Amino acid sequence: MPRIPCLLMICFLLLTLDDQAQRSATNETQRSTANDARVEMSLRDGWRFKFGPESATELQTEPDATWTTVSVPHTWNRAGYYKDAPASHINTAQNVVTTQGVGWYKLAFTPPANVSGMESFLQFDAASRIATVWLNGTLLGTHRGGFSRFRLDSTAALKPGRENTLTVKVDNTKPALGSSTADVLPLTGDFFVYGGLYRPVSLIFTKKMHLDLTDYGSSGVYAKTTSIASAGAQVQVRARVRNDSEQSGTLMLRTMLVDAQGKIAGQQEQTVTVAPASVAEGIANVAVTHPHLWQGVDDPYLYRLVVELSSKSSQLVDRVSVPFGIRQVRFDPNQGLFLNGKHVAVHGVGYHQDREGKGWASQPEDVAADEAMMREMGVTGIRLTHYQHGQPIHDLADRDGLVVWDEIPLVSQWTLGDHSEPTAALRENARQQLRELIAQDFNHPSVVTWSIGNEIDFGNGIPGFVGNNGGALPDPLPLLKELNQLAHELDPLRPTTLATCCEQHALAPGATVPITGAVTDLSGANRYFGWYYDKPSDLGPHLDSLHRTRPAQPMAVTEYGAGGAISLHSDNALGGAESRNRPQAEEYESYIHEQNWSTLQNKPYLWGTFLWNSFDFGSTTRSEGNAQDINTKGIVTFDHKHRKDPYFFYKANWTNTPTVHINSSLYTERAYRVADVRVYSNASKTSLKVNGKLIGVLADCPERICVWKNVVLVPGANKILASGTFAKGEVEDRTEWHLSEAAAKNTLIDCGALVAGASDEKHFGSDTFFEGGTAGSVSGPGGRGRAPAPVSIAHTSSPEVAATYRAGSFTYRVPAGDGKHPVVLTFVEPSLHPGERIFDVFANGQKVVADLDVAAAAGGPLTAYQRQFEVNARDGMVILEFRPTKGDAIVSAIEVQ
């Protein structure tokens, strides 16, 4: 077999590991003996890493000083950072590393001497995205795919009781024509592909005959519930027995289901004879009387499935033990998902596996914390996107009764350049990754569907931010149909699915969209009404239309939501222009979720809804909100610590946990002396106090949203207290908002702005107090995931304020003390010529500006122009009406002093 050059091997052998770590790992394994059925040795510590040369030959010249010592899980990448308050974040502009390419790992380790004569397998829980492995200079193999477990037979190359050198080349090069990864999925996507050995590595020792460890990373055991009745259930278990010896062997195969009390609930024994160097299968049909069913979050009861191989003398040869839930799932196209005949409301989230500071190299305790945070919010389902996730999240979902959507990384593209068909190698890689997904997650009761793709129906409207292919229009259907058939062959019981972006809603004008949703048993719709396009109210009719198109196909909504930053705030979520532009107010993210959920909860034909996303995640296609290279649609921040306001909206709606949450708590420096206070509460009665004064009590707030309008703040600190009445007592939330003396006296409105623009001289608030009109910006919309380029505006020291506007026929009702107030209006003509826009302005019924032609008065477009006048406020209000006579009226800023 191919070997690493001798000089490189000498270099490896000269490396010195930390002796204490090495002895600890060896001693831990020594406690197991060769008499044990199976021995596992963790290879966690003492690795050396270098990001560097393409080939092993080039690596020879690299001095030891250029390598660093690391522990596995490990990634060399760090992607995405928040731009504000860098000292409070882990990732910064200075420490991110988004370089993709080849990384090298090497480890010196000593396995115990008493495993001599056993089979050995190196197990990698994942390596991104191509891994090539040598042991003591012998090439063991290459694995192509960054998300699945794989094992390599290391028996011939291993030296028990002596120091061994393990070398791994890992390549996460960005796919391109002619690149090393051109045929490895995913080719693109709105997420960053980290490099490294980012999940655990271990060494497994078995007897010559054992449950198969070379079957696509599986346990070698496949179990499924074939029938359930009141008196009993039937569970079929298929076990693959491998014989790596040179002689035929016969073993006793014992299959058991053990209940939570340790009692055998059902079992079957049979003999299995396996020829030399081959695999034989044993199939057991285990009857369980009066089964305790896995009933989702209501009762996630788990048995333990135990499969044992024993010799004629009853000596244990091998053993696999995994949790198993007895359940049957049915999807109804009109009524949703049924688990063991009972309807289940699937309140779901999408989930990416990275986090700030760790990337993909998280620990099981990190995943457990994520899952606990989801459950606290009331999540009952998780869409594991857009690739195979590790075992920890699956085990937790089994334990806690969450239903899981599993997915392979066929995302957006399946060809490169102008190719109209995928290469044979890419098709095989897609098949391989689907085989691995199903083989490794087959036994999890939480997994209810296999997804064969995400958003591969862009057609020729694929956004440039994920890699436009130059206008070619390859057909995804042949590959999808091939994968769909394979999934059914591998698992006839679970339905297939995929997620679409564009059916009946192409994302580019005139785009041709392939209809992919009809390929699979189920379908999922990723739809962003009110964010990327249209209005939130358009979501319901669109979903109804999709349902009418294929009324017999169960459907889910698999993505919806909006971006949001906890440091960017709005006084009115409806005041902004082009919502997907930057900046992204936390309040607008809340608004989109409120509006979408109001629609989704009334669609009984949806078998599940999965908001996008549980956590902010790394994506080097984006520069938005307060972040660089982060997709900000999470309802929890990238460090997985701070819950954004929408999190509490769902907690109030999806759980019975007493919940009271004041929105905009982090909007501490207020722009206006009058504000609406919004509270998410599932209390029967919710009260609001400001500075100790009761503002009011609301009962059973619709959709758990309590709103107190026009609450007056005072200069200085304002203590906001919301309290909910529950059976076990009061639950409170409190925050403190500050109002400056200037904001108390002056109302400065940045018209058309969702988040107020910066001004050197004054503190503007975002657009509010308006009735009618639409918001706009002279900068125009930004690209998807990118900010618009700023436009130069003459004659202003506050270009960000001047750049947005409200247009149409509209009115502002500005709170103000009775008496005389100076008013300053700022106008900017975006593009029209003189004579094309003419309007009047009325103040409390009196015409104060007549026949204004902004382009003529300012001397042309993109030039600021101001008008000043005084108005007498009556009944605590200054009313400004903008009435067009030709075209639309327009205003960029209002100052009531």
Image: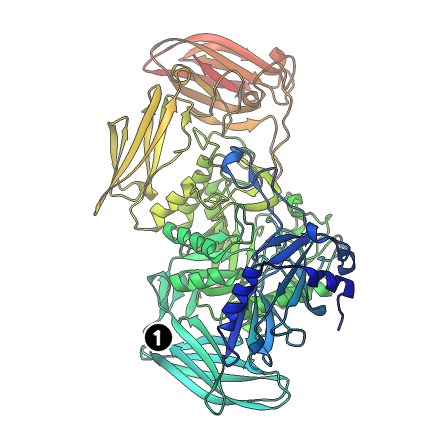
Q: Residues within 10 Å of mark 1 (few under 14, many from 20)?
A: some
Give the residue at mark 1.
Answer: 259
Image height of 583 relative to 42, above or below: above
The image quadrant of residue 746 is top left
Question: Is the C terminus in the top left, top right, bottom left or bottom right quadrant?
Answer: top left
Q: Residue at coordinates 63% horizontally, 54% vertically from top-left? A: 195
**Where does residue 773 sit, x and y in percent of width and height?**
49, 26
Image height of 509 relative to 187, above or below: above
**Front in this rendered view, residue 91 or 708:** 91
The secondary structure type at the circle numbered 1 is loop
The image quadrant of residue 729 is top left
**Front in this rendered view, residue 635 or 337:** 635
**Where does residue 537 sit, x and y in percent of width and height?**
46, 42
**Front in this rendered view, residue 600 or 36:** 36
**Side of 478 relative to 846 (left or right):** right
Image height of 57 relative to 460, above or below: below
